[in-house]
Image (tube, helix red, strand yellow):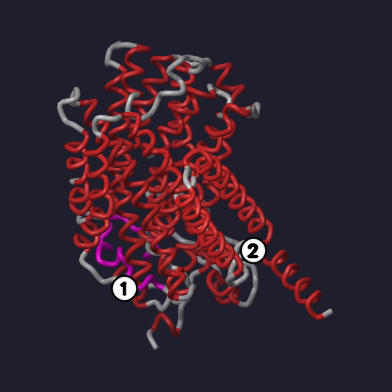
Amino acid sequence: MSAAEENPNADRKDGEEEDRLLLSSPQSRPSTSPQSDSREYEEEVAYESSEKITVVDVDDSAASDGCDYSVTPPFSWRKLWLFTGPGFLMSIAFLDPGNLEGDLQAGAIAGYSLLWLLMWATAMGLLIQLLAARVGVATGKHLAELCREEYPYWAGVLLWVMAEVALIGADIQEVIGSAIAIKILSNGVLPLWAGVIITASDCFMFLFLENYGVRKLEAVFAVLISTMALSFAWMFADTRPSGKELMLGLLVPKLSSKTIRQAVGVVGCVIMPHNVFLHSALVQSRKIDPEKKGHVREALNYYSIECSVALIVSFMINLFVTTVFAKGFYGTKQANSIGLVNAGQYLEEKFGGGLLPILYIWGIGLLAAGQSSTITGTYAGQFIMGGFLNLRLKKWLRALITRSFAIVPTMIVALIFNRSETSLDVLNEWLNVLQSIQIPFALIPLLTLVSKDQVMGVFKVGQTLERVAWTVAALVIVINGYLLLDFFIAEVNGLLFGFVVCTGTAAYVAFIVYLISYGGGLPSSLFNLIRTKGFGYTRT
């Protein structure tokens, strides 16, 4: 038995001794984790010696006996800075080209009326992401690893397939968005397929940056998010949307039958399946000993603040995009035909030049959104593949494999749809449906695991939060179910195709029911009530 196991509460003598003990801790993240070969970070929250970070430890022995462990060290701006990074990388999924297309269509078709829904959808996304961070910090493992350990082999494989399919769908949209931006900024000289090739090179940029540590990678994302914020804020200032209409849209809920599809799209774009897996892994870039309950609680507090700030920033960027297109195209004949491909040209025709033509401002923001989201997609792909399959591969090989999953189909799409804007918009609708289908296979495992004593220990969520989380998950799933039903009614034609869709839907629903029932996936009190009543009727 190691010294850390004999006395887990002993003070660390120096930084090197602490690193050795953390890596040998039985609950530290395993060496097979995809990020375990790139832990050279410049600044880490390692709870090192008191000369670097002053930490008021909690009496962990008392906590393990059921006593109060809620006392945490006082707030520190320095520690908040050291914890800042994972939440902003996660927030990229709220700003990817697929989301931007949903924003612009909501603004053009529904005007300012869905801003309140955008705000509450972001709040729902925040709750889900906070639970993902909670799992990663409290267990020392990310969601894909826990799914592999907690579910039967066949279920784990199916969950992996679903996560990969969702990631590929998201990545195609992100790469196409970058390619469209490159085409805009090159004045049409570079076609979509050339933009796809250029975007594919971000895999190598990701590997290059990762060699210099996570903090360098996080700095690059800070620049990209700042570029998006500046570009879309510039558009907002140039177009000058109505402040009164904006506030009414945020504060007064409105929903009509004509805008129901856009409303569903606003909610459906916020929860990205691969992002749930990604965030649970990103929070482990800071060294936190899961055995130290006070340290875990402190980390959760700082990550909650950081994640909230990141999603407020993403909400503001989405708000800028929605209001710009609401000001320019609501009630016009172009409203129903506008999409990611032609949005820049429509903006140019409507608002013209200025100091910098709005077409190029849009192109810069779209490029930043596409590039940042493709890099995080590569990152998520490594965690998903490594976690579910427990692979030991060189990081360049993992990145190459996960990148190829998206680049090959994207190149085919770019070559086929290069000359057809309408067809590309239809493809984006299908990709949105594809990702909507996968949402339950990220949310249900997350909510099941975060509610289990065996997995979370004392950091299991309480019953109130558990019920709220399941309500949010049910709402998101039902909303996306409506989108799927509406889409299939419009698109499914023919007896054979209808039979295939019905068969697939039956298998899909059966797997969701299995995931909910496995290990008591519903809130514990409700699940126990159903189980008790059911057994009672059976006995009588």
Q: Is residue 231 above or below residue 401?
A: above
Q: Position of residue 380 (x, y in %)?
A: 35, 55
Tell me the crowding category of disc 2: few under 14, some 14 to 19, or many 20 or more residues within 10 angstroms, Cα based.
Answer: many
Between 15 and 253, the one nearer to me in the picture? 253
Label 2 sits on a secondary structure element that is: loop
Tell me the crowding category of disc 1: few under 14, some 14 to 19, or many 20 or more residues within 10 angstroms, Cα based.
Answer: few
Q: Quadrant of the C terminus?
A: bottom right
Q: Tell whether label 1 touches label 2 (CB within 8 Å).
A: no
Q: Position of residue 318 (x, y in %)?
A: 45, 32
> What residue sits 41% from the left and 80% below the top?
4
Q: In this rendering, would 337 be left or right of 361?
A: right
> What residue sits 38% from the left and 51% below the top?
82
Q: Amino acid at mark 2?
A: Leu
Per the image, the residue denoted by label 1 is 31
**Magenta highlight on residue 471:** no
Between 69 and 241, the one nearer to me in the picture? 241
Label 1 sits on a secondary structure element that is: loop
Q: Is residue 57 above or below residue 254?
A: below
What stretch of residues is rendered in magenta? 28-50
Task: Count numbered badges in the picture.
Answer: 2
Per the image, the residue denoted by label 2 is 522
Between 277 and 304, the one nearer to me in the picture? 277
Q: Position of residue 60 (x, y in %)?
A: 54, 73
- Residue extending furthest toward the front: 495
Front of the two marks 2 and 1: 2
